[in-house]
Image (tube, grey):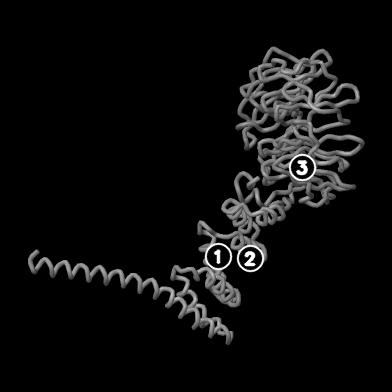
Amino acid sequence: MNRSVRILVVILCIALLGVSWLVAVTMQSDLERQTGLYNEAMELLEDGLYIRAYPLLEEAIDFNTEETFRIEEILKDVYLNLIDQSGFRRRYMDLLSRQMDRADAPPEVFMEAAMFHLSNRRLQDALAVLRDGIEKTGSEQLITLYEEERYAFRNIRTQLEYIMEGHNATFQIKNEGLWGVAGADGSILVPYRFDEISTFSGDRAFVMSDGEVFAVDRRGNRILKLHENVTEIGNFADNRLTLMIDGRWHRATSELEVGATYFDMIGMHSSGNAAAMQGGRWGVIDSSAQWIIPAEHGEVIMDELGRAYGQGAVFVRNGNAVTLLVDGERVGGTFEDARPFGEENFAAVKNNGLWGFINTSGELVISYQFEDARSFGQHLAAVQIGDYWGYINLLGDVVIEPEFLEAKSFNGGSAPVLTESGWQFIALIEYVGVAGGGLF
């Protein structure tokens, strides 16, 4: 090895040692510099000099050491002491967001952010934080607070003569003796000017006016006319409309093509099937009018819209006994009365004069305790407690206090309720703010 090469090797070794020393010194100096800033800030805080301390703490948290989170907690307290001054509310929330964005963020950070939003009456922001925290941490404490707050609602002051149960986030409404359709936000989609109106499905509903039947769009425009002698119309779903023609109930498609098969009575299609009566006995048909449950029962239990079938289940009455059929087979015991299954795997049933809830296995999941009840929709069920109606969640806890003269199921984030002023809507704030209505 010649002299110049040896010199180069020595220089490289010295350079490597220098870099290593510099890295070590830099790492050490980060902690030392952070500690120096922290100590200086703490001296100021002892004298209550928050306005002078916060810039030092802000500089200190820019160093990524094991002390950073502890200093952030002190800085948040400083911000809260200055919260009424311009800009410090935003600084506080930005620091919370920085903490929540970390992969290892603890549940306490999300709880702090949620409580801050709640104290400032920012419910939707609080719920968004709780959802994020639950997803990241699975904290039971966050879930509990979310359940306590998620069912807040606002009143939609539209006063109406009557509101039917909802379907596809629309509601049939009656005022001044005529029918129309409202959206879940209470807005009038189809003005009340018809003798009868069906549920909306897809882009249309069907109306009867002065003995004529039309399809109408969501603005009430007539888009199709039926040239048959119809005396009554039922509801429309799953591309099936029910019509009474010459004293018999038929079904028609969305294009008003009337089928030849007729029934004594027929309900509204739900989950592809409908209750139907033939020869004085009730069963269940599919969309092709084939019997999936033979017409051999005294009654098939339907809701206000005529829906009977949900979750693969239907309730039938024979004599005084109501039984549950799942996939055509009897499940569980007998009941005095029942409501059809809806969106959830729970249905309201009555025994010994009180209402509770069962699942599709026939198991009692919420005890018999209510004077009356509706089946669940959007995780909530309307129940009567004493003289008034409120709502319970899937655990059976009362989450909307009984204050209504009558209440119906939620659909599209809203539910019809009866007050002393008439029928109106209540709308879940959580549903309004979040598509799909939440986590659970």
Residue that label 1 marks: 96
- In the rendered structure, which amino acid carries the disc numbered 3? Ala
Above/below status of 429 relative to 17: above
Residue that label 3 marks: 381
Q: Horizontally, is 133 left or right of 251 in the view?
A: left
Which of marks 3 and 2 precedes in the sequence? 2
- The answer to which of 53 and 234 lies nearer the viewer is 53
Q: Horizontally, is 60 left or right of 184 in the view?
A: left
- Could you tell me if residue 125 is visible in this image? yes
For the residues labelled 2 and 1, the Cα–Cα distance comes to: 10 Å
- Do residues under tags 3 and 1 come within 8 Å of each other at their CB atoms? no
Q: Nearer the viewer, mark 3 or mark 1?
A: 1
- Could you tell me if residue 195 is visible in this image? no
- For the point 51% across and 78% down, the residue is 54
- In the rendered structure, which amino acid carries the disc numbered 1? Leu
Residue 115 appears at what percent x and percent y? 65, 63
Which mark is drawn over residue 116?
Answer: 2
Q: Residues within 10 Å of mark 2 (few under 14, many from 20)?
A: some
- The answer to which of 212 and 89 lies nearer the viewer is 89
- In the rendered structure, which amino acid carries the disc numbered 2? Phe
- Do residues under tags 2 and 1 come within 8 Å of each other at their CB atoms? yes
At mark 3, the secondary structure is strand
- For the point 86% across and 38% down, the residue is 355
Q: Nearer the viewer, mark 2 or mark 1?
A: 1
Residue 264 appears at what percent x and percent y? 80, 17
Q: Residues within 10 Å of mark 3 (few under 14, many from 20)?
A: many
At mark 1, the secondary structure is helix
- Which residue is the extreme one toward the bottom? 47
For the residues labelled 2 and 3, the Cα–Cα distance comes to: 30 Å
Can you say which quadrant of the picture contains the N terminus? bottom left
